[in-house]
Image (spheres, grey):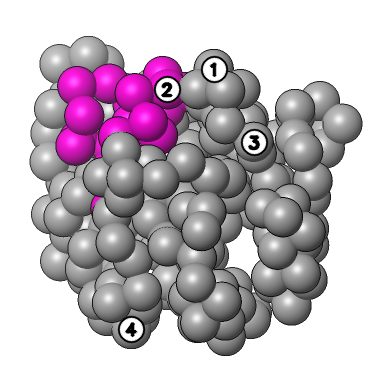
Amino acid sequence: MTAIVFDLDGTLVDSAPGIAAAVNTALAAQYCRPLSLAQVTSFIGNGVPALIEQVAIASGISMLRREALLEGFRSAYYADPTYLTALFDGVLPCLEGLRASGFRLGICTNKPEEPTHQILDKLGIAGLFDAVVGGDTAPTRKPDPAPLHLAFERMGRSGIYVGDSEVDAACAAQAGIPFVLFTEGYRKAPVEDLPHMAKFSRYGDLSALLSRAAA
Ligand SMILES: O=C(O)COP(=O)(O)O
Ligand SMILES: [Mg+2]
């Protein structure tokens, strides 16, 4: 039976408010004004170093202070990565249903492993996944295909990748893995600009879609 690998931020969890809160705590420590949720959301998807670089540019923070900004973000975010973070509607029954139908499940996210594991544990879904690949697991991050290949390798199966962003679509395309797009995440480009095999906006529709696709 096929494996299904999921992205995390903007796909399984709505984590942008928590990430924005930690960004703004780090900015306050550098005597900078807070950024809006929309602005921080637009920086999510390429991993923490890219997030902090974009925050620093938007806030006019010099290269010299970026390390302090990164440390401020890490200490605020890692203290509780589940703050203002929740599963999207219907995720839990969908994942349980997929497992019950015999699919193996994995995660491939650009979020570092430590907060990824904390989120999966505290939101009660850790036990559903056989492989978790974070932004610091492999030598490269998405859109490089290596982390996605690693997630499938760890499950010993091929399958489908489910994600929400340009980064995920590009990663799947480079890896030669079919991609299913969740349209309610943190994508910036129109749906038609992202290569995808299928798309969905409600988790209640995903199980039937994946069973058809994997048949
Ligand atoms: O940018 C991040 O840190 C994580 O984003 P992802 O879970 O969508 O890969
Ligand atoms: Mg994402």
Q: CA distance from mark 3 to mark 1?
A: 10 Å
Classify the position of the C terminus by image quarter: bottom right
Q: Residues within 10 Å of mark 4 (few under 14, many from 20)?
A: few
Q: Is residue 133 above or below residue 19?
A: above
Dot 3 falls on a residue whose secondary structure is: loop
Query: Is 59 or 181 nearer to us in this picture?
Result: 181
User: Residue 91, position in %: x, y?
Assistant: 57, 76
Q: Establish whether ligand 1 lies closer than 8 Å to the Cβ of label 1.
A: no
Give the amino acid type for the residue marked by disc 2 in the picture. Answer: Pro
Indicate whether residue 143 is drawn in magenta.
yes
* Residue name at image x 52 percent, y 54 percent: 2
Give the amino acid type for the residue marked by disc 4 in the picture. Answer: Gly
Mark 4 or mark 2: name the one nearer the start of the chain. Answer: 4
Q: Is residue 109 visible?
A: no
Residue 39 falls left or right of residue 211: left
Mark whose residue sits in front, 3 or 2: 3
Mark whose residue sits in front, 4 or 2: 2
Q: Which residues are magenta?
A: 132-151
Q: CA distance from mark 4 to mark 2?
A: 28 Å
Q: Establish whether ligand 1 lies closer than 8 Å to the Cβ of label 2.
A: no
Mark 3 or mark 4: name the one nearer the start of the chain. Answer: 4
What number of labels is visible? Answer: 4
Circles 4 and 1: CB distance less than 8 Å? Answer: no
Q: Which residue is mark 3?
A: 178
Mark 2 or mark 1: name the one nearer the start of the chain. Answer: 2
